[in-house]
C-alpha cells in the first residue's frame, strides 16, 4: 500500500493505522516521491491526497496510471471541493473520501477497492469469459474488447461492467449496483453510479451503436447493439 500526502502527521497516522490492518506500507510526501516509490514498490493500492506541495494530485494520478495501469487509487479531497472529486474520478481514480474522515472509512474503502481489483483472479477457471454482442470481458486476465478493439478500464469500471454483463438485458437499479460493486453504504451518493455509467459509455459505446441503456426511474442494462439498417 502506498500513502501519499502533503501533511506529514496525517500521512504517518494513516500509515500506522493501515499497518495495524496488516498491510505493508510505504509513504511519500510529494508527487515526485510517490512516483519513485510506486515504481520500486509496486503497491496493491494507493491513497493519494489531492493537495501536495510539488504538484497537484491529478498530475500524480496520471503518472501513477502510466506506471501502474491497474492499481486502485483512493484519493483524499476537501469536503467542499466537489470539482476535485469529479476531476479525480474522471482522471481514473477509483474512489474518494472527504476530509475530515475516519480511518475506519479509509480502511473499508481500500478493502473494497482491492477486492474489486482482484476479484477476477478468484473467478471460475475455464468459465471466465463473458460475451454480450461484440463485447468480451475476460474475468481472469481483466481484458476487455469490443469488436476486437482493446478497452482499458479502471478496477471499478471493470467490476461495474462485469456486473452488467453477468445480467444481460436485465435492468439493474442503482441500489443493486451500489450493493454489488461498491459493497458499502455510499451515504446517499447514488449519483456515483451515474458517473461511472457515463465513463463506461465513453469507453464502450463511443463511436459505436450503444450497448448500455438507461431505463428512467428503474436503472441500467446492457444488451447487444442493434445494427443500423443501411439505406436501400
Image (cartoon, rainbow, N blue to C red):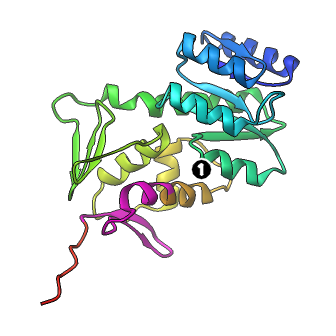
Residue 30 vs residue 141: left or right? Answer: right
Residue 84 vs residue 132: left or right? Answer: right
- Against 53, residue 137 (above or below) is below
Q: Residue 22, position in %: x, y?
A: 60, 10
Q: Quadrant of residue 214?
A: bottom left
Query: Which residue is at the front of the view, 225 or 166?
Result: 225
Q: Residue 95, position in %: x, y?
A: 61, 40
Quadrant including the C terminus: bottom left
Q: Residue 134, position in %: x, y?
A: 21, 56
Badge 1 local density, few (<14 within 10 Å), some, or many (20+)? some
Quadrant including the N terminus: top right
Query: Which residue is at the front of the view, 38 or 213?
Result: 38
Most distant residue in the left direction: 232
- Against 206, residue 103 (above or below) is above
| Residue under label 1 | 90
Q: Secondary structure at mark 1?
A: helix
User: Which residue is pictured at 84% across the width and 22% down the height?
Assistant: 10
Q: Residue 222, position in %: x, y?
A: 33, 62
User: Which residue is pictured at 45% across the width and 31% down the height?
Assistant: 117
User: Which residue is pictured at 47% across the width and 37% down the height?
Assistant: 155
Q: Quadrant of residue 130?
A: top left
Magenta stretch in the rendered image: 199-224
Does the magenta-highlighted stretch encompass residue 219? Answer: yes
- Against 184, residue 118 (above or below) is above
Amino acid at each position: 500500500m502506498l500513502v501519499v500526502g502533503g501533511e506529514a502527521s496525517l500521512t504517518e497516522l494513516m500509515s500506522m493505522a493501515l499497518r495495524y490492518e496488516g498491510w505493508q506500507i510505504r509513504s511519500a510526501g510529494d508527487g515526485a516521491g510517490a512516483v519513485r516509490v510506486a515504481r520500486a514498490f509496486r503497491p496493491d493500492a494507493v491513497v493519494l491526497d489531492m493537495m501536495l506541495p510539488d504538484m497537484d494530485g491529478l498530475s500524480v494520478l496520471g503518472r501513477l496510471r502510466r506506471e501502474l495501469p491497474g492499481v486502485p487509487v483512493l484519493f483524499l479531497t476537501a469536503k467542499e471541493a466537489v470539482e476535485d472529486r469529479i476531476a479525480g474520478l474522471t482522471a481514473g481514480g477509483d474512489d474518494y473520501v472527504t476530509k475530515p474522515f475516519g480511518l475506519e472509512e479509509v480502511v473499508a474503502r481500500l478493502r473494497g477497492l482491492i477486492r474489486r481489483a482482484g476479484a477476477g483472479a478468484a473467478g471460475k477457471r475455464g468459465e471466465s469469459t463473458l460475451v454480450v454482442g461484440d463485447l468480451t470481458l475476460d474475468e481472469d486476465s481483466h481484458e476487455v474488447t469490443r469488436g476486437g478493439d482493446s478497452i482499458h478500464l479502471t478496477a471499478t469500471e471493470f467490476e461495474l461492467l462485469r456486473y452488467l454483463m453477468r445480467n444481460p438485458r436485465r435492468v439493474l437499479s442503482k441500489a443493486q449496483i451500489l450493493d454489488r460493486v461498491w459493497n458499502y453504504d455510499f451515504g446517499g451518493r447514488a449519483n456515483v453510479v451515474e458517473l461511472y455509467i457515463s465513463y463506461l459509455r465513453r469507453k464502450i459505446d463511443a463511436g459505436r451503436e450503444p450497448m448500455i441503456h438507461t431505463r428512467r426511474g428503474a436503472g441500467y442494462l446492457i444488451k447487444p447493439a442493434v445494427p443500423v439498417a443501411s439505406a436501400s
